[in-house]
Amino acid sequence: MLKDRTHGGVIYFDNAATSFPKPQCVTDAVIRYMTQIGANPGRSGHKMAIEAGQIVYKTRKSIATLFGLRNPMHVIFTSNATEALNLAIKGVLEKGDHAVTSSMEHNSTIRPLHEMEKDGTISLSIIQADKTGILDPQKIRRAITTKTKAIIINHASNVIGCIQPIREIGKICRESGIIFIVDCAQSAGVVPIDIDRDNIDILAFAGHKGLYGPTGTGGMVISDGFDFKRIKPLKYGGTGSFSDKIEQPDFLPDRFESGTLNVAGLNGLLAGSKYIQKREGGIERILEHKTELQNYFIQKAETFVKDFYCYSSSQLPSTSVIAFKINSYSVSETTQILSDRYGIMSRQGLHCSPLAHKTIGTFPEGTLRFGFSIFNKKEEIDLAVQALKSVSEGKRT
Ligand SMILES: Cc1ncc(COP(=O)(O)O)c(C=O)c1O
């Protein structure tokens, strides 16, 4: 067993799935809502409901600031990035449209697109990334047809951490009048994003990863200049506004936010979003820190772990999502040993991204994945390398 541990006796490297631990201010904010505020925002005029409404508004504002958005009402809360991507994809694509996506997408993009292709609503082009997971914007340009309505791209890979040239791809979209939808599930809070500068029309984010909010938080952000009426709602229902009408309200955010929001989660997300934005050096420093941790791990593991093979590059900026394996060991066995014997939490397999694994040549087994957070330290990486070294020198499968 490893001696030095943090976070309640474990080393947590599964931050690409969801971050842990959360900053104390996030936990405090969730508890404050649960114990002192409690009410439903936008549904009544009493002071508890008003305070709940203020939480939601402040969270919108903080998320808007994070992405360089002027109008906080263009921030739509959903329960995760998957729901936001479904809303954006199903909301903009109509019968006869063509869409372009990539071989590095998460199933939360590929599955809704595939369903729409299968039922004959759209046609779809999937652009192949190179072995390092990077897309060539010119390949995307060449896939555009007169029917192309939207291009949907994953900003940062949940499999190998590489970051796509989204500004350049967005420029191609702007020049061609195509809607650019970006999956920022892994990049929000890790890579600086400015919705205008990066030429994004709609982005999806997860609140529970790099923003350190609770699970059950996420959202869709619509750029200030984009006509939101081009997006159909995914859900219809109560909004607390215009209750005399049976039509869905056609203003933001109510057009897309039916049903009671996860206010406890949003108060946590507000605390998490403020926490990372106030950190010294801001998001730029977070990216540098994560790249440093990634390079430290790769360099150490390559030196000490027998048969270590890494698919993530130490040459490029990275969200510190690292795909690797110890050759001759099954990834599921290695993950299990890391958890059971060493208290190290990692993730094995395909990470909901079969096409990305085909791209890097690791389908169908997948890889082991470490994802570091702002709280991980080099000492934890040293312990993990020590553990991997022991595994690599031990029993073969
Ligand atoms: C790139 C990417 N997109 C989308 C998602 C879906 O996020 P959520 O779990 O918040 O729905 C994930 C989750 O891991 C992801 O990594």
Image: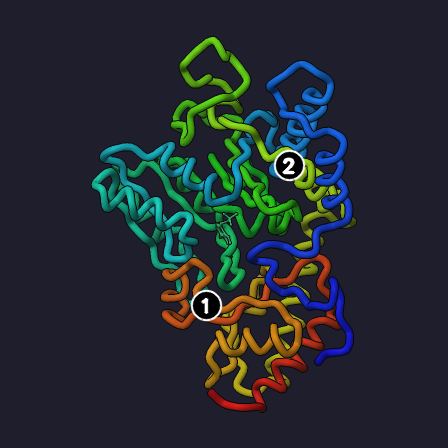
Residue 329 appearing in the image: yes
User: Residue drawn 61% across and 20% down?
Assistant: 42
The front one of 263 and 226 is 263
Residue type at mark 2: give it. Answer: Leu
Q: Residue 81: horizontal and vertical position, in percent? A: 50, 44
Q: What secondary structure is found at the residue carrying circle 1?
A: strand
* Secondary structure at numbered mark 2: helix
Q: Would you say 62 lies left or right of 154 here?
A: right
Instruction: Estimate the x, y position of residue 379 in percent, counting from the top left.
Output: 75, 72
| Coloring basis for residues | rainbow
Which residue of the protein is positioned furthest toward the left in this rendering?
A: 120
The numbered disc on residue 364 is none
| Residue in the image at 54% along x and 43% along y | 205
* CA–CA distance in space, label 2 to label 1: 31 Å
Among the 4 quarters of the image, the one containing residue 5: bottom right
Give whichever of discs 2 and 1 has the lower sequence position: 2
Residue toward you, 31 or 385: 31
Is 35 located above or below residue 40 in the figure? Answer: below
Name the spot of residue 121 as percent of width and height, x first.
24, 38
Q: Residues within 10 Å of mark 1 (few under 14, many from 20)?
A: many
Furthest toward the top, the residue is 244
Determine if the C-beta at disc 2 is less than 8 A from ligand 1.
no
Quarter that holds the N terminus:
bottom right
Please say if 216 is above or below 55.
Answer: below
Check mark 1 vs ligand 1: CB closer than 8 Å? yes or no: no
Mark 2 surroundings: few (<14), some (14-19) or many (≥20) residues within 10 A: many
Q: State the image coordinates of residue 21 (x, y, percent, origin top left).
A: 70, 56
- The one of 299 and 351 positioned closer to us in this rendering: 351
- Say which mark, if any, is on residue 266: 2
Q: Amino acid at mark 1?
A: Gly
Query: Residue under circle 1?
Result: 349
- Residue at image point 66% right, 24% down: 53
